[in-house]
Amino acid sequence: MLYRKYRPQTFGQVVGQEHVVKTLRGALTTGRTGHAYLFCGPRGTGKTTIARLLAKSLNCANFSKIFDGNFNEKLSIRRSLAVPSETLSEGWGEGGFDVPCNQCDQCLAVNQNRSLDLIEIDAASNRGIDEIRSLKESALVSAPSGGYKVFIIDEVHMLTKDAFNALLKILEEPPSHVVFILATTEPHKILPTVLSRVQRFDFRRITPVQIVGKLEQMAKSEKIDIDKEGLMAIAVSADGGLRDAEVSLSKVMASHDNRKEISVDDVYSSLGLIPLNYYPELLGYIVSNDKNSALDLINRAYAGGVDLEHLASGFVDYLRKVLMHTINPAILTSVGEELLDNDIKLISTYSQALTSQQIILMLNVFVSAKEGMKSSPIPQLPLELAILELISS
């Protein structure tokens, strides 16, 4: 799978979480790392990846030498890491250096899943008090390498209340060699007493433009030429989760294994996605009071296997963009950065042809239609009724 093959191996390769990376790099540089962290945010945004990078960096032999060694030692390490900088200025990024090095024994052990210093626990399947007691006993034992022993607890919100209470004491007063990294998609389920003992980092959804950039790099490495619009369709469907987008790209490539060029139609057919031109087309029929064409589009989509609930959600999102443009065109840049130039022109045209009140009416009608689809005996009926209601009014 591409998401495993191209998982970031240094902080500089992480996409879309610059605020988290900057803070953790600063803590590593100054030696002011905490004993417990909470990484929370939507799925597929890099929580586990950054947790592993932090764990590797804490025990990276070359990283510690860069900061703690003498002049000659620092210069030697940087040359061995192929650092392009001519000076010893401790800077990150271009002209500087990055961590972890992925060359020392400690980094290689983590990369090869044989490190005894890193313990990863899935709280969804190890959620009881007995598992946490075993964790506490393990934490009291020093790391085999003599460095940090790092515990990554994924889906930590799945722990039982008793398990959380058992975890509290060691979170409050952990051994000096232990670092806990908790990860969750549902931070509201974490006990307040736990939240007060950790440094919290909120991961953001990754923007479609950032996802497309990463997918383009992967496609280039795999020597596959994929239509830019197809990549954008994948990015939009991922809803801010880079991993979901990478899985979708893997599926598209597997579906066209012998082809080096993949079109946007190939992407739509492989993933069952809704073509992005459906939304302006449907809105055009409604604006022009062409009920026959609008109803035909709904039934064509249904016959073609399109998920009508997804179609309704996508159309509501499209109407929202038109509304934002009607209020202030500048707002569209923050809610519609995945739009192509032609899409922006269409949205601009519709925003001039419709008033805010008309668009709000459309939004309310289609939101209600989407809710009605859950109990409708005929899947397309709520959308058909919504179209007829808008055209008749």
Image (tube, grey):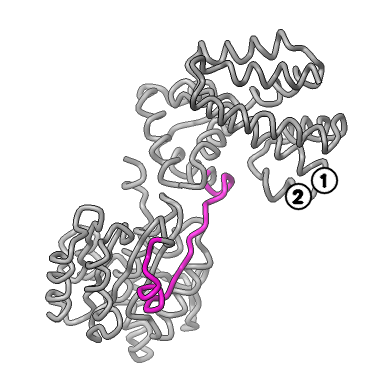
- Please give the residue where the numbered disc 1 appears in the rendered image: 327
Residue at 15% across / 64% down in the picture? 131
Residue at 51% across / 36% down in the picture? 237
Is 2 or 321 nearer to us in this picture? 321
Q: Quadrant of the C terminus?
A: top right
Q: Amino acid at mark 2?
A: Ile
Is 166 or 113 nearer to us in this picture? 166
Mark 1 crowdedness (10 Å alpha carbons): few <14, some 14-19, many ≥20: some
Residue at 52% across / 40% down in the picture? 235
Q: Amino acid at mark 1?
A: Ile
Residue 257 percent location from the top left of the image = 35, 24
Is 314 or 167 nearer to us in this picture? 167
| Relative height, residue 228 to residue 299 (above, below) | below
The answer to whether residue 147 is left or right of residue 360 is: left
- Please give the residue where the numbered disc 2 appears in the rendered image: 331
| Relative height, residue 23 to residue 131 (above, below) | below
Residue 97 percent location from the top left of the image = 44, 72
Tell me the element at label 2.
helix
Residue 84: give its label.
none
Per the model, the C-alpha gap separating discs 2 and 1 is: 8 Å
The stretch of residues the image draws in magenta is 189-211
Residue 283 percent location from the top left of the image = 73, 24
User: On the image, which quarter does residue 280 sit in?
Assistant: top right
Residue at 37% across / 65% down in the picture? 190
The answer to whether residue 323 is left or right of residue 6 is: right
User: On the image, which quarter does residue 311 sit in?
Assistant: top right
User: On the image, which quarter does residue 264 sit in?
Assistant: top right
Question: Does the segment drawn in magenta span residue 199?
Answer: yes
Callouts 2 and 1 close, C-beta under 8 Å: yes
- Of the two numbered discs 2 and 1 in the rendering, the one whose residue sits closer to the viewer: 1
